[in-house]
Amino acid sequence: MAFRDADWRDGGFTPETEQRFYTFTTDAYVRAFVELANAKEALPPYPEQYGRHSVGVAGHPGIGLWPMRSVPHWTVPKRFKADVDFFYGAGAGGWVVSDRARLLFEEIDGPAFEFDEALVTHGADGPMELGPYWRIDVYRVLDCIDDERSVIDGGPSGLDSSLLQYVRLIDVRFKIELVDTAHAFRVRQGYGPIFDSAIVDEIRSRKYRGMSFTPLQMPTFAETKGADIGRNSQYWRSKSPLQDYWEARHAESDRRYREKLARKAK
């Protein structure tokens, strides 16, 4: 089946020149292989498993990096060949990043981040080419979302019933005057982190690996065409000026999958 070419002139997309905002997660393939090898030695006691930075809500534990008892050691099986720049620190919270990724974050918005030493190896002791690695977290908190104009999954906060507790950000309007020059931040009660397009575009242009992004506004044309629209993909495709294009692609993909199953069943 031939699809018509998607074109930015169909309109409705966020211009690539505008400031955009994203949440993110680890690529599923990366996440499946990472293990914390020295959890018993490195992890702090349970009451201390939160960061030292308050988020300004009574009763809420701090955000940021946990104070580990020793350098945490994550292992990646030797069968996993590719070096990665990002993964979620399984078993210990927070992100782990390569040295080149750490330098990128410090260059764009150093005051938003904190870093601490981490050890990442192939198997028990095989070096990772992108090492050294670092634990990383964002501890800047901005109450900068316009709740009334945004599409958000959430409900009343258990800590303060007058506040909306964010569960998932979908289509968000930010109070830009409160964001100001920040490129990385969390929002109310520590939800996040969130990166703006200055960071995301640079990560993509450098082809750093391991992180998947979810746009918090209508995606750009390139993101929509490339299906790089993360956890909110169903919502954005329903809003896209290319909805018929996506429906046709989905139908064609489903048809090919069913044909493949039918051939295997013979």
Image: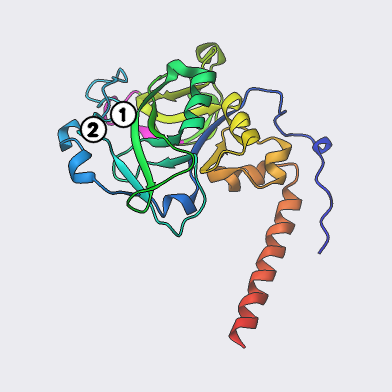
The mark total stands at 2
Q: Residue furthest bottom?
A: 266
What segment is highlighted magenta in the picture? 153-162
Residue 61 locus on image (x, y percent): 25, 27
Q: Quick check: is 48 in the magenta stretch?
A: no
| Residue 90 visible in rendering | yes
Q: Amino acid at mark 2?
A: Met
> Residue beneath label 1, please?
65
Q: Is residue 111 left or right of residue 117?
A: right
Indicate the secondary structure of the residue bearing disc 2. loop
Image quadrant in which the C terminus is located: bottom right
Q: Where is mark 2, residue-wise?
A: 68
Instruction: Name the residue: 65% across, 66% down.
Output: 254
Give residue 68's position: percent from left, percent from top: 23, 32
Residue 78 vs residue 21: left or right?
left
Q: Is residue 244 above or below residue 51?
A: below
Residue 67, picture quadrant: top left
Q: Residue placed at 53% from the left, 45% from the top?
A: 231
Image quadrant occupied by the N terminus:
bottom right
In the image, residue 112 sits, relative to residue 65, either above or below, namely above
Circle 2/circle 1 CB separation < 8 Å: yes
Where residue 81 appears, as percent x and y from the top left, is 50, 54
